[in-house]
Amino acid sequence: MNKNYETALPEGYVTAYEIDAKNKKVGILLNMAALLIMAAVLAAAAALIRPANLLENFDPLKWGIVILAMLAYIVLHELTHGAAYKLLTKQKLTFGFTATVAFCGVPQIYVYRRAALISLLAPFVTFTLVFGGAVLLLPEAWDKMHAAVLLAMHLGGCAGDLYDTLLFAFRFRDPATLMNDTGPKQTIFVPRNRS
Ligand SMILES: [Zn+2]
């Protein structure tokens, strides 16, 4: 059976990459990437759905529900990472918030690439299906747009997860690659001579 994690960094591994969302520059770049993704998704949704005039169709109750759903989403996104980590490692999880990031990590272990990818992508896949499905299935144009606002926020909020995923997809393809995830900070380790 494939091992999902190590409790200590094995002999011969070296640090290959660090991404720390609490680092000011990284935080700003991730938030800018998030805003760009949100703007792109909203623009695409508006162009495809073509909802009628916002002011004439403004429904405060529905926008209130959108805002509550956003707040719930932030927690559910992290719980989805946590559920994947828990299933794969059975370890104690860490959750938290800062001004710019919400996070879930499993700081005391080193997870293998496959388990890291599953946990990174769990919220992306889950909520893309939920909000994307709502955009497609809701019959009324403004209801589709409300769902699209949630989809846009979700995809933007996955910027950090997607960045880590791209690193694993293109740069760290060795299955022996390990990741330590404190929540806001991910450190990638590779066997020496294989980096
Ligand atoms: Zn995430």
Image: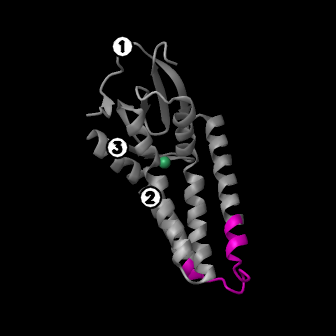
Q: Are marks 1 and 2 in contact (CB under 8 Å)?
A: no
Q: Are marks 3 and 1 in contact (CB under 8 Å)?
A: no
Q: Quadrant of the N terminus?
A: top left
Hey, which residue is sitting farthest bottom in the picture?
Answer: 56
Q: Could you tell me the amino acid type at mark 1?
A: Glu
Q: Residues within 10 Å of mark 3 (few under 14, many from 20)?
A: many
Specify the quadrant of the image occupied by residue 177: top left
First along the sequence among labels 1 and 2: 1
First along the sequence among labels 3 and 1: 1
First along the sequence among labels 2 and 3: 3
Distance from disc 2 to disc 3, alpha carbons, whole Å, reads 15 Å
Looking at the rendered structure, the number of numbered marks drawn on it comes to 3
Q: Could you tell me the amino acid type at mark 3?
A: Tyr
Residue at the spot of label 1: 11
Please name which of the two marks, 2 or 3, marks the residue nearer to the observer.
2
Specify the quadrant of the image occupied by residue 104: top left
- Residue 126 tag number: 2
Would the CB of label 1 be found within 8 Å of ligand 1?
no
Residue 187: x %, y % from top left: 48, 29
Residue 125 position (above or below residue 134) = above
Provide the secondary structure element on which disc 1 rests. Answer: loop
Provide the secondary structure element on which disc 3 rests. Answer: helix
Residue 51: x %, y % from top left: 69, 79
Provide the secondary structure element on which disc 2 rests. Answer: helix
Whether residue 131 is visible: yes
Observer-nearest residue: 54 or 117? 117
- Residue 85 tag number: 3
Q: Residues within 10 Å of mark 1 (few under 14, many from 20)?
A: few
- Residue 57 tag number: none
Residue drawn 40% across the image and 26% down it: 176
Q: Which residues are magenta?
A: 44-62
